[in-house]
Amino acid sequence: MAGNDDAKHHRGVIGNAKNFWLYSSKTGFDITHPPTPSSPPVTPNVTIQTTTTPITVDPAKSALVIIDMQNFFLSAAFGRTRGAGHEALDQLVDHAIPAARKAGIRIVWLNWGMTDQEIDEMPPAVTRAFGFDTLNDEEGILNGNVFEAKGAGNAVDKHGGRKHQGGHTVLEDGTKGRKYMGLGSECGVVHCPETGKEINAGRLLMRDAWNSALQTPLNRMYEEGAKLATRPDVWIHKNRMSGLWGGRTACEDFLEQEGIRTLFFTGVNTDQCVGGTYLDGFSKGYDCILLSDGAGTTSPEYAQQCIEYNAANTCGFSTSCKAFGEGVDAMEKGASADVSGGRADSGAAKQM
């Protein structure tokens, strides 16, 4: 009997009157957010196969969120060799970004980009994650205004070691103005791989600095998207690993203003800034989908697997950039078929 019950078609409404999903055992989860559960289907829509079940989304209420694909994290100028982040970049360029453009899904470039005030107010836990500086003074280090002396001492890594365990060798040698002292510190002059010339990389992860710019070719893709007449790309600064932390952020303001409820997450690092933003989005009631091959990390493989597992099985859904693109392609084919069918019907009506 149980087997027969399982085989029966069943439906459900999940959530509340202001924020709900529809479930069908035949078609999966409808997360298009129609006005009411009995409203006609939202069109156009995109159905995407995830690792667990199909989901159907409304492009107008969706955004592709690309996190921290910046020079500091990816460029050879900072000693970055090809890795998972670069593989994720390829998937974005080849599949996710073209698909979002085609479907009219907004692209949000969510990046580190701080102000002096934010640096001054940064809590120690966040500051430490990027390294800090110390003074050569075994006694009386706290007698003066130690905060004004920041940047005048020795660069150390997040563990307090001068050898920067697993750190940023290009910034640590002290040549050409490079002396790594964490967030807001001068990166000095680096060799730009794209131009072959030396360039001042600016202060670490500050707004408008070269080290904070998007890695090529994403910089060009953002510039093109920002010029779109409809649903142009938007660049949003963040000052924590999560772009949706706390009571309110610029990202949340934008999403609410644009009526965006469904977020496709990509970028680096999967288990840090991407995962942190994903989890905060989940807690705030957004529909969260991880494009797992569009997100990469320098952490061990199990860190990536942990985020992928929880995204797929607890906090939302997980899929690939290619599957995302295939869903959009299917939407386009369906729209073309509808147009062709409409023309045929129109012609038949005239003949009558």
Image (cartoon, rainbow, N blue to C red):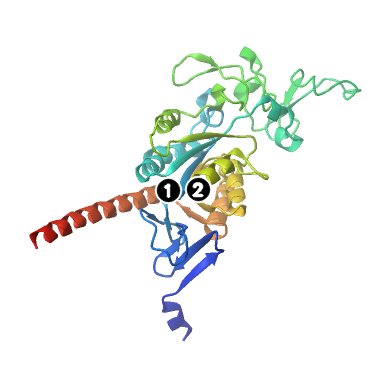
In the rendered structure, the answer to whether residue 175 lies left or right of residue 74 reads right
Q: With respect to residue 3, does 269 lie above or below? A: above
Q: Quadrant of the C terminus?
A: bottom left
In the rendered structure, the answer to whether residue 276 lies left or right of residue 9 reads right
198 or 233, nearer to the observer: 233
Q: Position of residue 121 (x, y in %)?
A: 74, 31
Q: Which residue was labeled with disc 1? A: 60
Q: With respect to residue 312, does 123 lie above or below? A: above
Circle 1/circle 2 CB separation < 8 Å: yes
Q: With respect to residue 262, does 225 lie above or below? A: above
What secondary structure is marked by label 2?
loop
What secondary structure is marked by label 1?
helix
Mark 1 and mark 2: Cα distance apart in space: 8 Å
Task: Name which residue type carries label 2.
Answer: Gly
Task: Name which residue type carries label 1.
Answer: Ala
Quick one: label 1 or label 2, which is nearer the N terminus?
Answer: 1
80 or 321, nearer to the observer: 321
Q: Residue furthest bottom?
A: 1
Q: Position of residue 120 (x, y in %)?
A: 73, 27
Seen at 38% across and 61% down, the residue is 41
In the rendered structure, the answer to whether residue 85 lies left or right of residue 188 reads left
Q: Position of residue 320 (x, y in %)?
A: 43, 50
Marker disc for residue 146: none
Query: How would you rate the neighbour count of disc 1 (Cα within 10 Å): few for under 14, some for 14-19, many for 20 or more?
Result: many
Seen at 76% across and 17% down, the residue is 152
Q: Position of residue 270 (x, y in %)?
A: 56, 44
Query: How would you rate the neighbour count of disc 2 (Cα within 10 Å): few for under 14, some for 14-19, many for 20 or more?
Result: few
Residue 252 falls in which quadrant of the image? top right
Residue 148 falls in which quadrant of the image? top right
Q: Which residue was labeled with disc 2? A: 259
